[in-house]
Amino acid sequence: MPDWSYRTLFRPLLFRLPARAARSLALGLFGAVGRMPGGAVVIKTLGHQEPSPLLETGWSATPVGLSGIVDPAGVARRGLARLGFGFMEIGPVTALPVESRQPIGLDAAAEQLWFPEPYENEGFNRVMAKLANPGHSLPQYVRVAPMPGLEPERTEPLTLLMMQELIFAGAAGFYVDALPPGWDLESSGRALSGVADWMEQREAELRRPLFLHVAPDIEGERLVGLLQKIDRTKWKGVVIGGGLRSDGGRTEHEEPSDGGALENGEQAGGRAVGHEEQSGGGALENGEQAGGRAVGHEEQSGGGKVEGACGKEPALATLRTVRQHGLPDWIVKAGSGVHEPQDAVDFMRAGADAVLLGSGFVFAGPGLPKRVNDAIQQERLQAVPEMPPPSFWRNWGWIWLLGIAMIAGGLAAWFIAGTTVLLPYDEDYLGMTGERLTAFNEHLLHFMSHDRITLAGTMLSLGILYYRLARYGIGQGRHWARTAVTISCAVGFPSFFLYLGYGYFDPLHAAAAILLLPMFLLSLRGNPDRPYRGTVSLANDRQWKRAMWGQLCFVALGIALAIGGLTIAGVGVTRVFVPSDLAFLGIGAAELDAFNPRLISLIAHDRAGFGGALFADALALLVTALWGIQKGERWLWPTLLFGGAPAFIAALSIHFHIGYTDFVHLLPAWFAFALYVTGLYLLYPYLRARS
């Protein structure tokens, strides 16, 4: 689910479902992709999320983390870990499961989620099992919370027991709820001090960093009072996360049920679950250990918590309080109200070291981690001197020359296909002239011309793409541009052998391939990528949302052209003709073969060559559409315009020129053209935006 599909197709559908059902469906499907063979490649291909070394924090690859509210059951963490996150929050985790049947409220207009309080979780044992087998390499920080309603003095031993087991399961650190509901400052201070003392007494290899976890809307005076009651040197920092207090606040369209308490822990909206119902065992196998028991949410008071854009300002205020009264070397992570890259930038400028994405991930889309990474990287690049421009001959100049050569070849091929159609060696191969072919069938040369002109137009488009990707992409150190050209060339040059599928060897094409191949090989020499210093998208504004539709159009176009190229190449080396071809010619394949046994081989050579070139063109376009769409990349819009125009002009004009206007035959071309024009229209404001 990249943003161009999530914002345009999936989010509108998911938001029509109840929030719980939508979450289960989305995470279930995404988790299935992450677990399947090759799933990591699929996610990487669609998102291109590799973080820059500039984002390294010393404790994670990026300062962007995944909040525990996104995937509380851990069904999709393997896939989510590949979206550009640097670390994960797991939890909150309680000793026993906390369940609820109350609906999760969703207000799309206000970008708010309402969760029952306390937050649901599967309980310690199940969390521990998943923590030990994560399927990814990101550090996992566990947020530990007390059992709802359990007295503070009975909570500490249970918390320490959980933490001991979680350390062995692979926890990278702990977020400890600092002021649970109903606890006073004295109780919280004693409990936190007990946890910190216990961790300090652990062997060095078993110690883990501790973070205070505080709500974004905690009163400043209460927070300062808590900080004064603990030894701050024993804590690594603070996490500002969770939702805002809500006195039963729900969205208008989802009201939780009010049912009263029933016997045996059953509730109208939730249920109590003894820990013995869980499978997997663990350190806490008895539902009554340390006085704890699982609860349904209706046993709690106070309504719920609101997670959303509304959490940003309270979290910023809390961040300023932490920076004023905490230690200078504390790591502070902000996990409330980050819904667009600008929010993350605001938190980092206010003193945060990292951000966690929760409700913003739901509303903005799966591309938000990458967009936040890009925005943070832009901030850090201001202190990094710009690298010298790469050498023309060292790398990008060879692709530039390759593009120029293909443009020249495309123009020459178009001229020949529009005049004589056949070259002297074509006539030698057939043993007859073009006039003889026309005398046999008046449409035959026109048909061959239509194949060769569409090939010429595709060569022109591909040459323009290579030329501009080299000059403005590879020449500026864009990794995605180099990848686009490399993949395209890697399939384009081998497609030469498709010409041999019917036994026809084209000396001119062979000479061109021999001349151009060294240019491609020389371009593969090492040339380090350079960090992107252009404009980045900081807001989920109308321009960005419109661009997601434009990107979807070009991704669909790239996929459609790739399928078309493979189909045409396949037809070219097998049956050569489709029914509409023979209808236009007014003659059957057997009659053509009887007239000249070498004629079909020559036509097959044209078709297979066109299919291979179209496939190479499609891959260059597809990689560009997937990875290259970035706000303010002004050079890219003309690249898409002029890189597509020759192919469409050639394909459509020649069909009308020769009278080959079969509706079904041209329908794929018109569909592709509609995607092309629509995509250009939608992307124009975004790509042409000035810094």
Image (cartoon, grey):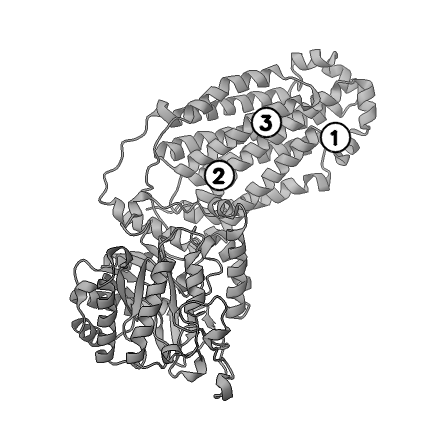
* Mark sitting earlier along the chain (3/1): 3
What secondary structure is marked by label 1?
loop
Q: Secondary structure at mark 2?
A: helix
Numbered mark located on residue 640 in the image: 2
Residue that mark 1 sits on: 575
Cβ–Cβ below 8 Å for labels 2 and 1? no
Q: Is residue 380 above or below residue 291?
A: above
- Which mark is first along the chain, 1 or 2? 1
Q: Residues within 10 Å of mark 3 (few under 14, many from 20)?
A: many
Q: Percent x, y for residue 366?
A: 45, 55
Asked if residue 640 lies left or right of residue 206, the reply is right
- Disc 3 designates what residue? 495
In this rendering, which labeled residue sits more in front, label 2 or label 1? 1
Q: CA distance from mark 3 to mark 1?
A: 18 Å
Q: Residues within 10 Å of mark 1 (few under 14, many from 20)?
A: few
| Residue 182 position (above or below residue 409) | below
Q: Quadrant of residue 650?
A: top right
532 horizontally vs 233: left or right: right
Residue 367, above or below 72: above
Of 110 and 637, which appears nearest the observer? Answer: 110
Q: Quadrant of residue 459?
A: top right
Residue 531 spot, x, y in % from top left: 32, 40
Circle 2 residues within 10 Å: few <14, some 14–19, many ≥20: many
Would you place residue 218 above or below residue 677 in this image? Answer: below
